[in-house]
Amino acid sequence: MGRQPELNGNEARDLLALLVQAVDKANQGLVVCNKKGRVVLRNAPARELVNARDGDFLAEKALEAALGRALAGAYHEETLDLYSPTRHTLKIRAYPLGGSNPPSGAIALVDDVSELRRLESVRRDFVANLSHELKTPLGALSLLAETLDGEEDPDVVARLTARVGAEATRFSRIVDDLLDLSRIEAGATGSLSAVALSAVIDEAVEGFQEPAAARGIRLNVAPASAVLNVMANRRDLVSAVANLVDNAIKYSEPGGAVYVDADRRGDRACLRVRDEGVGIPRRDQERIFERFYRVDRARSRWTGGTGLGLAIVRHVAAYHGGDVSVDSVEGEGSTFTLWVPLANQGRDRD
Amino acid sequence: MGPLGRATNLAVEASDDLAEGQSSSAVRLIRSLAGTNAVVCTHGDVIAEILVTLADEDRVDLGLTPRQAKGSVWALEGKDAFFTSARYFPPVVAESV
């Protein structure tokens, strides 16, 4: 290592100013105190994290205590939850500086770990939900297999065998949807290209005419008022629209109708799937796009839903630079609106 | 159910809701009994359907490989038509005298 050249007074001041500017650019809050406990340096993130909150008093006290313990020669770490005005979690770590007996000062590093905590909580919930969702059909298969063993009545065997098939299909659907969701969330979606929205809608509704008719539900697809080309991954957009149509049919009563239409709104295409079904209670409307969230678990079981369809729609919309929203009145029906950016706006104007 | 009824001095009531293939009505009956002390006996396929429904709709944990050997018992706990737990008791093998 080369020897540090000696600095004159001006050079030392310039270097100090430079260092202060450098630590101001860090993402982490940093507070340094001298051996008397007086704060001699507090970078910009530390000022922002600790001082800009209503809970700053608590944060400041925790920081002082952490620096005090570090000045006593010990590493200190603590996590601080602040609830005002919104919940924030700060992680504070303090180290003695210049040897520990006695230290010549102390440094405290402050991180805002709120988002990390939120993501950990989301991940824990997801794993818990996932294990339950996978265990249920597996448990059903185990129960049904034991019941089938030794059963001689052909009617019962036929019924149980059908149930085994249904549970296996259900398991397979969950795995398929999980893989789709994982691929979309990981961004492994391929490039977007100009796709005719009418072709996407046609492909998405293609398989639903028969099951809708079988349940006495009319599936009405309005012809597009103009050529609408959107920037899309065709496969994923078809999957998103199909999920919306599938849900609309599943949550409609016999004799009802499902309407699909699209038009242009500014620089985006707006695709609507409307049903006259059971609707969604207001309290559930914000949560229906969460993975495995179900408004009516009994109905979902009966319809064979995986609880992942709307999460897939939301992710598809997001990575297309679009959005999805719901407008629903319990007992009257729901309208899901999918927004996707238009491609080649100049040519597509009607 | 006869010996249990005699031992506990309780009448045994037959219900068509528990007949083979009647899983929906069986689930309704079981839900109506949530929070009470009742013993119900039915066919294996109906039990399987009830358990899977409760695992699905009430998020009752049946374990990874739930069983239902002939003569076994599932103890369900809950209230207000909703179940919170299920516990398996394997069949009791009678000791030969």
Image: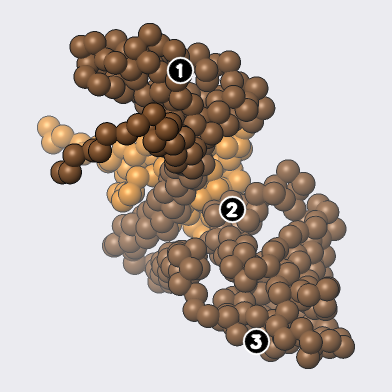
Q: Left or right of A243: which side holds A28? A: left
Please tell me the colour of chain A. brown
What's the chain of the residue with tag 2?
A
Residue at the (41%, 56%) spot, across then down: A134
Q: Nearer the viewer, mark 1 or mark 3?
A: 1
User: Residue A133, percent across and down?
Assistant: 45, 54
Residue A109 position, x and y percent, is 40, 29
Asked whether the viewer can see residue A104, the reply is yes
- Does dot 1 land on a helix, a strand or a loop? strand
Tell me the number on the disc at residue A39.
1
The residue carrying mark 2 is A290
Q: Which chain is drawn using orange?
A: B
How far apart are labels 1 and 3 at the CA level?
A: 58 Å
The residue singled out by tag 3 in the image is A194
Question: Who comes first in sequence, dot 2 or dot 1?
Answer: 1
In the rendered structure, find residue A89 and report the number of the disc placed on it: none
> Which mark's residue is nearer the viewer, 2 or 3?
3
Q: Amino acid type of disc 2?
A: Glu
Q: Residue at x 70, y 88 (%)?
A: A196
